[in-house]
Amino acid sequence: MAPEVLCTLALPKPFPALVSDAATLRTAGHLMSRDELVSELRERPVDVLCPQLRESVDGIVLDAGGSRLRCVSLFAVGFNNVDVDAATGRGVVVANTPGVLTNATADCAMGLMLAAARNLCEGDREVRAGRFAGWEPEYLLGQDVSGALLGVIGFGRIGQAVARRALGFSMRVVYFDSTDPPVAEDLQGRVSPTPLDTLLREADVITLHTPLTEETHHLIDEPALRTMKDSAILVNTSRGPVIDEATLARALREGWIAGAGLDVYENEPELAPGLTECANVVLSPHLGSATIKTRAAMAELCALNALDALAGQTPRHCVNPEAWARGAPPPLIHAAT
Ligand code: DGY
């Protein structure tokens, strides 16, 4: 039986060619509800499933995959849409695409930070609406980025890439990360760990780079927003539910903080009521990794993870290698390089 891979949405080059060389690639061409995924996997079992970050893969979906499903290969670094414990318990490895989207996502965070601090999107709206009447001494004044204190919450690869960029903008950088990650050599001595409460109280700009877990769900809630400076800018390129978005809309409207730059939302693609009416928030549609090169690199890694699994090898970027602790399934293809 030829190995089969199911993608819900079509993935960019080189994914199709890499996978089709070794397996039968089926692409649904649309996002699938949980029920659709369940009936699809029951009716036409596959070895590898490549879902999208908006599709939830829980124990019921994994059960529908039966004993044939060996790997869930994500086209994303975030894996909060997959019940990893359920996958591990069923001997299914879960793979993701870390590293290749670090710079693109960090660039996006900097873009949102600068745009929000300097009213660039509001300015754009003013110009387009014909309301720009010429330079004035106090027109659309924003916050200084240079010299400001940046608080990075979540200091993994992307948080550190943002810190590196911020230092280039003459910002001072503190960070909070409950996992105490290793700090890259070039950042040592230039950034300091800080308790979360201090960071919230003192930072001029706060940027979120934490994975979405039970602990980080609504990490930025009403008390956190009320702790921040009224001049603070909040940036989120991680996952929407890290912020209590309805409360953020209130905070922006009532001036608890000065502004925000958001790339991700609590219930994508819906936004909390009132958010779009706030002039002091810059809203981008989950574009963190959206560059041609980055998406191609993600597609390649997603394919290589799938091919590793088909070859009976733990995927090169696997979030639960313990799923195969009692032995990997037999190879169906030769190992990819
Ligand atoms: C991810 O990879 O988790 C992003 O949200 C999409 O690139």
Image (cartoon, rainbow, N blue to C red):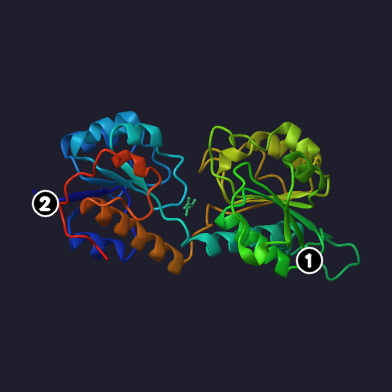
Amino acid type for the residue under numbered disc 1: Phe
* Labels 2 & 1 near each other (Cβ < 8 A): no
Determine the residue positioned at 11% across, 51% down.
Answer: 2
Is residue 318 something that shows in the picture? yes
Determine the residue positioned at 44% across, 44% down.
Answer: 79
Number of numbered callouts drawn: 2
Relative to residue 306, is residue 120 depicted above or below? below
- Residue most toward the left? 1
Taking depth in this image into account, of 178 and 233 the one nearest to the observer is 178
Q: Is residue 43 left or right of residue 188?
A: left
Q: Mark 2 and mark 1: span between their CA atoms? A: 63 Å
Quarter-of-image position of residue 230: top right
Determine the residue positioned at 17% across, 56% down.
Answer: 23
The residue under label 1 is 132
Amino acid type for the residue under numbered disc 2: Ala
- Report x, y in % for residue 224: 74, 36
Determine the residue positioned at 54% across, 32% down.
Answer: 214
Is residue 35 something that shows in the picture? no
Please state which of the two labelled residues, at mark 2 or mark 1, is closer to the viewer.
Answer: 2
Relative to residue 163, is residue 268 depicted above or below? above
Q: Residues within 10 Å of mark 1 (few under 14, many from 20)?
A: some
- Residue most toward the front? 326
Give the secondary structure at mark 2.
loop
* Mark 2 C-beta closer than 8 Å to ligand 1: no
Give the secondary structure at mark 1.
loop
Taking depth in this image into account, of 60 and 28 the one nearest to the observer is 60
The residue under label 2 is 2
- Report x, y in % for residue 270: 53, 40
- Report x, y in % for residue 312: 22, 50
Quarter-of-image position of residue 277: top right
Relative to residue 267, is residue 99 depicted above or below? below
